[in-house]
Image (tube, grey):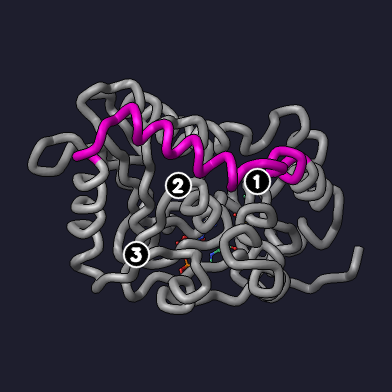
Amino acid sequence: APAYENIKIDVVGSKKNVGLIQLNRPKALNALCKPLFVELGKAVTDFDSDNSISAIIITGNEKAFAAGADIKEMQNNTYSDNVRAGFLREWEDISNCGKPIIAAVNGFALGGGCELAMLCDIIYAGEKAKFGQPEINIGTIPGAGGTQRLPRYVGKSKAMEIVLTGNFIDAYEAEKMGLVSRVFPVEKLLEETIKLAERIGTHSPLIVKLAKQAVNQAYETQLKAGLQFEKSIFYGTFATADRREGMTAFVEKRSPNFKNE
Ligand code: CAA
């Protein structure tokens, strides 16, 4: 198996047909830096093309699934940098996977962490999970699908509330609004998620793949235009002083002083 620095991979389940990916930057609450995403993309692609694997699980640790895109990495980005690099472009690779991907979320799933969970096909949560799109606190907006996927899960009013306040929601609220399909005790989450993956694995891999495509047709139609729109606005926040102040204040551990500029 390839040596990874920012993730750990394993093959689990009684038939060894479930690919498990654990995000592994615990000191940064699994902030989703580019090297992590490059590894994640490779691990997902490898499991997708491995005939012995029926479904894939992405998880974090008890404190954090992922606390967002890496603020320290993007703190000094300019609008031009983002456009040139296609910043966060590799995130969408996850949605090209033909096999089911299940997010098992304990702890924080914030910003890009919530967006990564929503890039998966099913979200299971531990009782202490916390979801949110707190980008507004640091002077930007969700940039990896949050403004487009969240309303599809929870409807406009809830999505607006989450995106405009930056407030966190707990696992049971997330279940009630349809973001999460089930909630389990923290220590049971992974085993229940593996059971789900194994259940899916009892079916024809071909039909599972087609069924996933069909559900996604309902879910993703008109999403592309929305995602392009979102990315241009997200990049645009990097042309503002308030975005710079918001991220600088986070890194300096102080409250931001926004100037409406
Ligand atoms: N990026 C980079 N580093 C992060 C991070 C992030 N998103 N989230 C946490 N960290 C780092 C902290 O800087 C800290 O590092 P140091 O020890 O080097 O100081 C470490 O992880 C532990 O974090 P805290 O000390 O802040 O832990 P806490 O328990 O006090 O707070 C928290 C936890 C409420 C989740 C807090 O860390 C937090 O608010 N994080 C940022 C959440 C956020 O704004 N996410 C959105 C990011 S923007 C985005 O994702 C854009 C997009 O849509 C693509």
In-image side of 203 versus 69 (left or right)? left
In what element is the residue under mark 1?
Answer: helix
User: Is 218 covered by the magenta stretch?
Assistant: yes
Q: 145 or 204: nearer the eye?
A: 204
Disc 2 vs disc 1: which is toward the camera? 2
Write down the residue under mark 3: 106
Q: 50 or 89: nearer the eye?
A: 50
| CA distance separating discs 2 and 1 | 24 Å
Residue 107 screen position, x and y as percent: 38, 67
Residue drawn where x is 71% and y is 66% of the image: 136
Closer to the N terminus: mark 3 or mark 2?
Answer: 3
Q: 212 or 14: nearer the eye?
A: 212
Write down the residue under mark 1: 74
Does the Cβ of the disc 1 residue fall within 8 Å of ligand 1?
A: yes
Question: Can residue 160 be seen at all in this image of the molecule?
Answer: yes
Prevailing SS of the magenta stretch:
helix
- Span colored in magenta: 201-228
Asked whether the residues under the numbered discs 3 and 1 touch, taking CB atoms below 8 Å apart as contact, a structural biologist would say no
| CA distance separating discs 3 and 2 | 15 Å
Q: Amino acid at mark 3?
A: Asn
